Image (cartoon, rainbow, N blue to C red):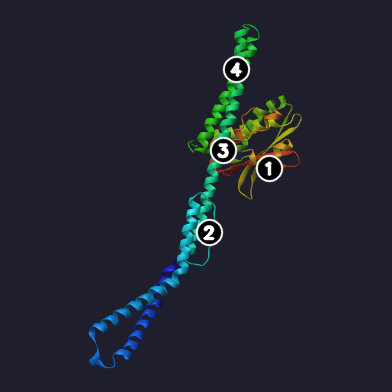
Amino acid sequence: MRIIHANKLLIKLFFVILINALLASLVFFLLVYYVYNTYFQDASAVDPAFVNRLYLLILFVSILTFIVGFAVMVRHKIKQISYLAQEIDRIASGNLGHQVVIKGNDEITSLGANMNRMSLQLKELFEKERAHEQERHQLISNLSHDLRTPLTSVRGYVQLLHDRPGENDQAYLRVIEEKTQQLERLLDQLSEVDRLYDGRIVMRPELVNLSLLTTQLIHEYRLLFEMEDLQLLSDIEPDLYVMADMEKVIRTLQNLLANALKYTPKMTSVHVVARLNPDSKTIIWEIQNETDEPTIRQMDKLFNRTYRVDISRGETSGEGLGLSIAKQIMKLNNGDLIVKRQGKHNISFQAIFPSFIKEDK
């Protein structure tokens, strides 16, 4: 059945040839019968040259019958092939995504279906490439602005040191140092994004006690949150183990904590939760904080490498690559990083790890 289904067009062609061969043969024998009864009743009067001419004429009419019959019976398929050729030209001329009309159930129909899939795939690839190109241009534009801002500050304070030596030198030098560190962070992030997305980064998975690691990070960050009038709360289930690259997991969690520290309104709280989800057999590391409505409306763009908080609101320092880096790190660790809305004004980032059951020795 599979062979028959796969060669429907060949079977149809075989039957067309067979039918027309039978038709041509029938015409041949009918003509022979008619000629014999009409011209050859008296065998003594038969001219051999005349017989040969009649035979050739009958053979010609039979062959012509076969050709005409075959052309009439396959004209529909020829039209289909001609139509597909025209449609291929339309797609090749740049009309990506164009769909051909499919009729029937044979190899030509299958070819049309494959053309439709190919056209859609080409359109999708082209749109992805165009979006990637636009993203690249936007990223370069953003980074140009981000690099220019601290460089302008450094240039200004260097000029102050030159024009007013001895006056507030230490304060100026501290500002220069901060701006230089900001430049270094931007360049490090850009380099890491490039390596992460090109797959040139080496992962070194190991058994990580996520509960202990989270507890240590919260202890380190609690004072920083208190200095910003923020309360850092935690609910960590014990003995949560994951198989991941510890260094990059620490980078991810630090990034999420730093993001909450930077954008959470003062006099509010930040909640960190680490728990096992028995249904999906995953470990969820979650950080939840209050935010503003514009950020919630733009949640789907937060992991975009080119996304920036509205500069006119003065809420960005231009280091918007962090969340993109964190998400890519989670994917390389066979996990994911998602964002959800919690309540009216809260946002939740969830780092999802495959759980690892540590066997007792």
* Residue, disc 2: 100
**How many discs appear?**
4
For badge 3, the amino acid type reads Gln
Q: Answer whether labels 3 and 2 touch (C-beta < 8 Å).
A: no
Instruction: Say which residue label 1 marks.
Output: 340
Q: Distance between the residues labelled 4 and 1?
A: 39 Å
Dividing the image into 4 quarters, which one contains the C terminus?
top right
Q: Looking at this view, is 236 or 231 the one in front?
A: 231
Based on the displayed image, in which of its 4 quarters is residue 237 positioned?
A: top right
| Crowdedness near tag 4: few (<14), some (14–19) or many (≥20) residues, C-alpha within 10 Å | many
Residue at image location 75% in from the left, 32% down from the top: 268
Tell me which numbered mark, 4 or 3, is placed earlier along the sequence.
3
Q: Quadrant of residue 253?
A: top right
Q: Tell me how far mark 1 sits from mark 2, CA to CA.
A: 41 Å
Q: What residue type is labelled 1?
A: Lys
Residue under numbered circle 3: 134
Mark nearer the N terminus (4 vs 1): 4
Q: Which residue, given by chain and number where applicable, does mark 4 sit on?
A: 154
